[in-house]
Image (cartoon, rainbow, N blue to C red):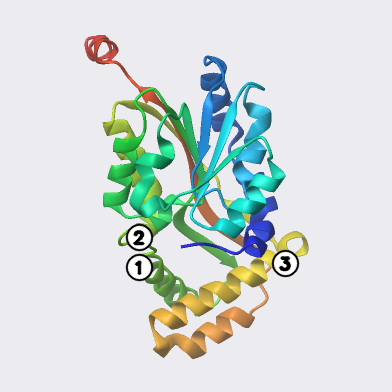
């Protein structure tokens, strides 16, 4: 599954405002311990996340940008000419994508993945690598002023998000919690922060309008019986919108000896 460059540009400011500074600092602290660390952004799109993280990474850092969309990858590489672009199908070859990484980063991606794919990803993650995942959708949405159509439209959206997006049945709003849990089970120290978009019409009107259109379309595709309600929902004027996400940072795997010491402390 791929998204348009226009959509990625439209959401860029909201993404930047939502990312948790503390978790980016945790990534920076890990990278500072390494000599010329190799960072890999998977599902990079136009490379917005890696571009934002450059000020948190040492100047010696090396960057690999991975996506399965050549057009988006070309845009990302043009904006970051020192990065290595790699066209890889993440559904089939996640192991190839993250090979040799000191840090793997991604944004707004894991809610599209299945539990089985997340298991594969964590198994492929090099033991000594850290992980930073920004803006995984958590299923929490608040649209104000509220409408009586909100519950049914958002319920149909949740169903739509659980469809297969190319990685098996998607986890949707359950992805963040499951990813954090599985990283911890992989003997990694995990930090989680809530990072919702908090949008208002005066500043984010274009984004709110596009979200309304996309959600109404998804609801009607899931259940044609709600098409009329979806159109009412799409055309409503909303003043404030909150879309829930979580950011996750996980350090390298904890060595067995250190785990044993922790268990006895």
Residue receiving disc 3: 205
Callout 1 environment at 10 Å: few (<14), some (14 to 19), or many (20+)? some
Q: Do the numbered discs 2 and 1 sit on residues whose CB atoms are within 8 Å?
A: yes
Q: Which of marks 1 and 3 is in front?
A: 1
- Give the mark nearest the N terminus, 1 or 3: 1
Q: Position of residue 194 (x, y in %)?
A: 51, 43
Q: Quadrant of the rendered structure where residue 147 is?
A: bottom right
- Give the mark nearest the N terminus, 2 or 3: 2
Q: Do the numbered discs 1 and 3 sit on residues whose CB atoms are within 8 Å?
A: no
Does residue 254 appear anywhere in the picture? yes
Note whether 112 is above or below 224 in the view shown. above
Q: Which quadrant would the C terminus be assigned to in this image?
A: top left
Q: Quadrant of the rendered structure where residue 235 is?
A: bottom right
CA gap, disc 1 to disc 3?
28 Å
Residue receiving disc 1: 163
- Give the mark nearest the N terminus, 2 or 1: 1
Does residue 134 appear anywhere in the picture? no
Check residue 170 in the rendering and tell me which mark sits there, or answer none: 2
Q: Which residue lies furthest to the right in this view?
A: 202
Q: Is mark 3 on a helix, strand or loop?
A: helix
Q: Is mark 1 on a helix, strand or loop?
A: loop
Q: Where is residue 177 in the image (x, y as percent from the top left)?
A: 36, 45
Q: Position of residue 70 (x, y in %)?
A: 56, 57
Q: Position of residue 144 (x, y in %)?
A: 61, 67
The residue that appears at 38% across and 22% down in the rendered structure is 128
Q: Do the numbered discs 2 and 3 sit on residues whose CB atoms are within 8 Å?
A: no
The front one of 69 and 203 is 69
CA gap, disc 2 to disc 3?
29 Å
CA gap, disc 2 to disc 1?
6 Å
Q: Is mark 2 on a helix, strand or loop?
A: loop
């Amino acid at each position: 599954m791929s998204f348009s460059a226009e959509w990625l540009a439209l959401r860029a400011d909201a993404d930047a405002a939502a990312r948790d500074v503390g978790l980016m600092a945790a990534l920076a602290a890990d990278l500072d311990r390494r000599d010329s660390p190799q960072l890999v952004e998977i599902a990079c799109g136009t490379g917005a996340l890696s571009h934002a993280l450059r000020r948190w990474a040492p100047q010696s850092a090396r960057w690999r940008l991975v996506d399965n969309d050549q057009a988006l990858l070309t845009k990302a590489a043009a904006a970051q000419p020192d990065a290595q672009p790699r066209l890889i199908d993440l559904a089939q070859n996640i192991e190839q994508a993250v090979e040799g990484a000191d840090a793997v980063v991604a944004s707004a991606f894991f809610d599209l993945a299945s539990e089985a794919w997340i298991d594969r990803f964590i198994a492929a993650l090099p033991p000594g690598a850290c992980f930073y995942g920004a803006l995984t959708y958590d299923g929490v949405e608040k649209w104000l002023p509220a409408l009586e159509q909100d519950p049914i439209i958002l319920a149909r959206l949740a169903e739509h998000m659980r469809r297969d997006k190319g990685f098996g049945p998607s986890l949707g709003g359950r992805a963040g919690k499951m990813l954090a849990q599985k990283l911890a089970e992989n003997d990694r120290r995990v930090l989680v922060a809530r990072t919702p978009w908090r949008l208002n019409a005066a500043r984010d009107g274009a984004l709110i309008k596009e979200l309304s259109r996309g959600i109404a379309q998804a609801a009607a595709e899931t259940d044609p019986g709600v098409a009329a309600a979806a159109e009412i929902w799409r055309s409503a004027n909303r003043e404030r919108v909150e879309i829930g996400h979580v950011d996750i940072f996980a350090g390298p795997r904890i060595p067995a000896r250190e785990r044993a010491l922790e268990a006895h402390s």
